[in-house]
Each structure stands twice: as C-alpha cells, then as structure tokens.
Image: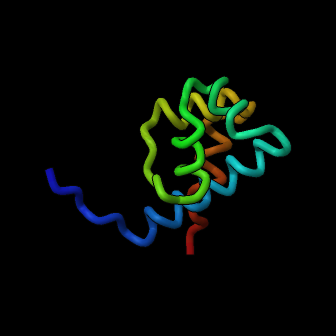
Amino acid sequence: MVRTPLTPEERERGERLGRLLREARGSRSMNEVAAVAGLSAETLRKIETGRAPTPAFFTVAALASALGLSLDEVLARCTPLPA
C-alpha cells in the first residue's frame, strides 16, 4: 500500500500537536506519560518530534487524557487560524 504524501498543512498540524504535547508534559518523562496513555515512549517521541504527524484518533485521545487536555483544546491549539 502506497501512502499519499502529507500536505504542508498536515505536517504543520503535526508539529503543532507535538509542541502542545511537549508543553503539556512539562517535567514529566516521556516514559511516564506514555505508560499512562498506554503507548510506547518511542511512539510519543515520534509524535512530539513530528516524525508521526498524523497519529490515530485514539492515540491522541489517550495522550490528551494522560496530560489533562480536552480534545476540544487539542483541536483548537492544532488547527491553524483562518487567514
């Protein structure tokens, strides 16, 4: 299966998500947050660094829950402002 290349907008949204997660994680370790979310630390690392810019919905939901973020907040912070 060949994956369609991501658009620049999709990459930017992934970068915003990564920044949001890093900020929300604060001083907690990747291992700690990943364990609470039921993910591997490597998965969290890939999302935070933008190497996995389009994580699955349930991955984002688990991370949001582990970090005390609402999905509405994640959406608002990761969606670009209208031009």
Residue 9 image offset from top left, x and y in percent: 45, 68
Q: Which residue: 69% across, 28% down?
A: 66
Q: Is residue 57 left or right of residue 7?
A: right
| Residue in front for this viewpoint, 25 or 57 | 25
Residue with the most extreme bottom position: 83
The image quadrant that residue 18 belongs to is: bottom right
Q: Is residue 50 left or right of residue 21?
A: left
76 up-or-down from 36: above or below: below
Q: Is residue 32 left or right of residue 58?
A: right
The number of discs equals: 0
5 up-or-down from 56: above or below: below
Residue 78 image offset from top left, x and y in percent: 59, 55
Residue 52 image offset from top left, x and y in percent: 46, 52
Residue 69 image offset from top left, x and y in percent: 71, 35
Q: Which residue: 43% across, 72% down?
A: 8
Colour approach in the figure: rainbow
| Residue in front for this viewpoint, 76 or 6 | 6
Q: Which residue: 63% across, 44% down?
A: 74
Residue with the most extreme right position: 27
For the C terminus, the image quarter is: bottom right
